[in-house]
Amino acid sequence: MSKIYPNKMSVVMQGEFVVFLIGMRINKLWKVNKWWPVFRAMPRMLKELYTQPELGFLGHHFLGPITLVQYWRSFEHLEAYARSKDYEHLPAWVNFVEKVRHGTGDVGIWHETYRIAPGEYEAVYSGMPAFGLGKVGKLVAASGHRESARGRMH
């Protein structure tokens, strides 16, 4: 079981970082041949990312079975991984595009990327294990200037 931090905690990140939200939507459950390869690709990518820290991946957590939040050191790291022929993502993407090229809408995918400047974020955790940004950054007591959301933003 993960350590629970009973007190109010915040997080400190060094420099810029990226928050990447990604997910899929199964529009036609019976079209397993369209969505199953997408579903299966993510665990392979995550395994690869966790075993190669030089890729700039900091960590992730799931928001549900088909939506997750990823943290990256920079947009450049994220983009380099996404475009590289040497890693799991690009072949999975090409496979997906081939399967849905006729625009049937059987399965949808989405992502959003947020580049976060130093000091332009805030996070608070209470009675929680290290989670989200607190799992990839440095957990610190949410006291003093970190007591309020406004204080944590600056």
Image (tube, grey):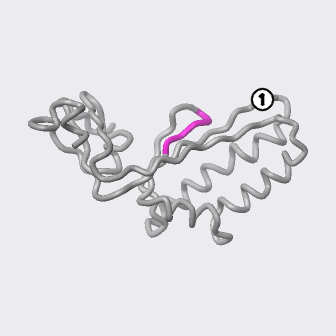
Q: What type is the residue that disc 1 sits on?
A: Asn
Mark 1 = which residue?
27
Q: Residue at x 53, y 40 (%)?
A: 68
Task: Give percent across and percent down for residue 82.
Answer: 61, 61
Question: Within the image, what quadrant is residue 123 found in?
Answer: top left
**Looking at the picture, how far across and down is residue 154, in whole percent?**
22, 43
43 lies left or right of 96? left
* Number of numbered markers: 1
Q: Is residue 23 left or right of residue 4?
A: right
User: Which contiguous range is marked in magenta?
Assistant: 65-69
Question: Compared to 42, does 107 lie above or below?
Answer: above
Q: Quarter of the image holding residue 32?
A: top right
Relative vertical location of residue 8 with respect to residue 88 in this rendering, above or below: above
Q: Is residue 67 magenta?
A: yes
**What kind of element bears circle 1?**
loop
Instruction: Report the front residue among 33 and 16.
Output: 16
Residue 21 position, x and y percent, is: 53, 42
Left or right side of 65 for 122: left
User: Hey, which residue is sitting farthest left in the picture?
Assistant: 144
> At 45% from the left edge and 55% from the top edge, which residue is drawn?
72
Foreground residue among 6 and 58: 58
Of the 4 image quadrants, the one containing the N terminus is: top left
Is residue 4 found left or right of 19 in the rendered image?
Answer: left
x 82%, y 35%: residue: 105
Which secondary structure class fits the magenta region best?
strand
Check residue 25 for magenta coloring. Answer: no
